[in-house]
Image: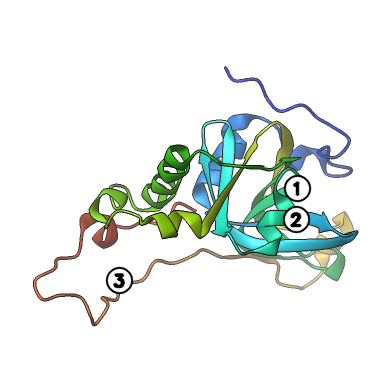
Amino acid sequence: MTEPLPVTDRSRLRRLHERGHFDRETINAILDAQPMCHVGYVRDGKPYVTPTMQWREGNHVYWHGSSASRALRSETQAEVCLTVSILDGLVLARSGMHHSLNTRSVMLYGTAFKVEDPADKLQKLGNFVNHLYPGRYEMLRPDHAQDLKATTVLGMEITEGAAKIRTGGPSDDAEDYALPIWAGVIPIRMEVGDPIPDPRNLDGVEMPAHVRDFRYGG
């Protein structure tokens, strides 16, 4: 069995410890289910948070963006905090204090590195596309040299962090259960709609299976 992440001063939960998870299976499952993430870093003494897309390969997480991005240049070889969150429900209690959210989230800490080797970078970008749409990258026109030059790929080893999960209904004060107030959960989920073809698709180009059968992993 894979060793869990260590509990550090940054990753430990100060309260509601039962919601914390440090096993890699739980952390990996959340990372794999939600491609959108936010990367936090400090530049010139000021905090910044950048939304982007992430994908996991083994014990590393990767994200990409424009080579002209000041954010990505600042993140390289810098301490960053990467977070992924999935909203599963709104929890309505009998008091404002106990309203909550059912969520799954991961917060990771580490030092970002730049993927420099062109072949490795190309492979990572292919993995990024295929993570969402299996087999699509091989159908696309090959990346031009300028495409690779314009794109930066950053990575971070998964060595410090934790998942936090809340499920279930409200947790009210004992005396509040006698109040005539509706309480419960409004489930929330991301819904996949029907694909919308580009009007400039060539005649006769069929929709591939990875589009037709696409399912959101959340």
Which percent across, then down, holds residue 10?
Answer: 85, 40
Q: Nearer the viewer, mark 3 or mark 2?
A: 2
Label 3 to label 2: alpha-carbon separation: 33 Å
Give me the residue at 70% from left, 61% from top: 71
Q: Is residue 197 left or right of residue 29?
A: left
Which is nearer the eye, 3 or 153? 153
Label 3 secondary element: loop
Q: Does the image show residue 23?
A: yes
User: Is the residue under label 1 in contact with that under label 2 (CB below 8 Å)?
Assistant: yes
- Amino acid type shown at disc 3: Pro
- Amino acid type shown at disc 1: Val
Label 3 to label 1: alpha-carbon separation: 35 Å
Residue located beneath label 1 in the image = 80
* Label 1 packing within 10 angstroms: few (<14), some (14-19), many (20+): many
Q: Does the image show residue 39?
A: no
Residue located beneath label 3 in the image = 195
Which is nearer the eye, 40 or 193? 40
Give me the residue at 68% from left, 51% from top: 83
Please tell me which of labels 3 and 1 falls first in the chain: 1
Q: How many marks?
A: 3
- Give residue 8's quadrant in the image: top right
Label 2 to label 1: alpha-carbon separation: 6 Å
Residue located beneath label 2 in the image = 40
Which percent across, then down, holds residue 24?
Answer: 61, 31
- Amino acid type shown at disc 2: Gly
Whether 198 is drawn above or below 73: the answer is: below
Q: Nearer the viewer, mark 3 or mark 1?
A: 1
Which percent across, then down, holds residue 91?
Answer: 69, 63
Which percent across, then down, holds residue 102?
Answer: 66, 56
- Give residue 203's quadrant in the image: bottom left
Label 2 secondary element: strand
